[in-house]
Structure formats: C-alpha cells, structure tokens
Image (cartoon, rainbow, N blue to C red):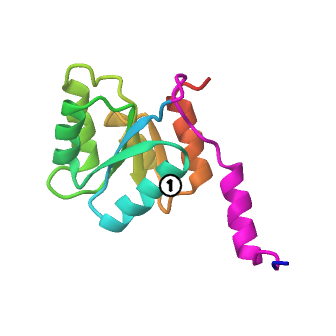
C-alpha cells in the first residue's frame, strides 16, 4: 500500500486540475506569441500559457515579435513592456500599422502595476494588462477576455 502524496503535491495536482484549458472552438490550441527579453520570464510565461492549453512561440525583443507576428498567424501576443532595441509600446504601435494585425489582441506584461502604466499600455494600442509576477488565474481571465470560447 502506498502512502498518500505529500500536501504540496496534492495541492499542485488540485490546482492543476482546477485550471481552465483554453482551446479554439475546433479543439485545437490557441497560438500565442510571448515577447520578453528575459529568458527566465520567457520560460515561466511559456509554461503558464502551456498549462492553460495554449501553444507558445517566444520572441526575445520587440523587433523579433514584430517580425514573427508579420510572418505567422497568432491568436494573441503577450508583450513585455520594457525590452531593449524595441520596447513593447513601440512594438505594439508598429503591429497596429501592419495589414491584418490591427485587431490582434496584445496583452501587456509588466512589473509596473500603476494606473499610469495601464493607461500608457492602452494608449500604445495594447488591449489588456497583466502584472509580473504573473498569476496564472489572472492570466487565464485576461486570455478569456480576448480568445473566443465555446
């Protein structure tokens, strides 16, 4: 007879079981582009999105995000605000000028939770806002607002 799982494993399993699994109406995964200059943030962000059922591609800065979004059809973009070369504000403004990307949902990802930061994100053309460290349930709620569900 095996002993019960330790409390932290039971809690993690219960939490994972309670997470929503977001998918397209046809059952296929949504495709997200995650842009962040920090490799650890890209790894953690990808893991959170994948735990919610999304397929994830990553970009290491705004230039790469714009190039990738121009070359593939993403369902949404999670955009770090502060990145070298091309920050999230400028990258989003640029995305908005490209054919077919004017309505692509862009969710800002930032450690700055101030009202002014939120206003700056919206002024740059971002649709929503999540703060770092990313809470998976807050992320799921933001994704639900921008990805049609069945």
Q: Which residue lies furthest to the right in this view?
A: 1
Can see residue 43?
A: yes
| Residue at (31% x, 37% y) in the render | 124
Q: Is residue 46 left or right of residue 125?
A: right
- State which quadrant residue 68 falls in: top left
Judge by depth and name the residue closer to the eye, 4 or 101: 4
Q: Is residue 35 left or right of residue 19?
A: left
In the image, residue 130 lies at what x, y percent? 49, 49
In the image, residue 36 lies at what x, y percent? 31, 56
Q: Is mark 1 on a helix, strand or loop?
A: helix
Residue denoted by label 1: 48
| Residue at (74% x, 59% y) in the render | 14
- Image quarter (top left, top right, bottom left or bottom right) of the C terminus: top right
- State which quadrant residue 30 falls in: top left
| Residue at (35% x, 28% y) in the render | 104
- State which quadrant residue 148 falls in: top right
Can see residue 111?
A: no
Q: Eyeballing the image, is 101 above or below 38?
A: above
Is residue 7 in the magenta section? yes
For label 1, count other residues whose C-alpha is less than 10 Å away and answer few (under 14), some (14-19) or many (20+): some
Q: In this view, does 75 lie to the left or right of 18?
A: left
Q: Eyeballing the image, is 80 above or below 7?
A: above
In the image, residue 72 lies at what x, y percent? 24, 32
- Image quarter (top left, top right, bottom left or bottom right) of the N terminus: bottom right
Q: What's the magenta region?
A: 3-27
Q: Is residue 109 left or right of residue 17?
A: left
């Amino acid at each position: 007879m095996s002993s019960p799982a330790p409390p932290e494993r039971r809690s993690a399993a219960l939490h994972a079981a309670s997470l929503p699994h977001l998918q397209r109406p046809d059952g296929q995964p949504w495709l997200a582009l995650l842009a962040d200059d920090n490799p650890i943030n890209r790894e953690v962000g990808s893991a959170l999105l994948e735990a919610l059922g999304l397929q994830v591609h990553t970009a290491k800065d705004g230039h790469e995000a714009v190039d990738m979004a121009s070359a593939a059809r993403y369902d949404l973009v999670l955009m770090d605000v502060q990145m070298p070369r091309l920050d999230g504000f400028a990258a989003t403004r640029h995305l908005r000028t490209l054919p077919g990307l004017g309505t692509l949902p862009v969710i800002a990802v930032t450690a700055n939770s101030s009202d002014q930061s939120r206003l700056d994100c919206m002024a740059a053309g971002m649709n929503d806002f999540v703060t770092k460290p990313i809470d998976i349930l807050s992320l799921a709620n933001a994704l639900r607002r921008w990805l049609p569900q069945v």
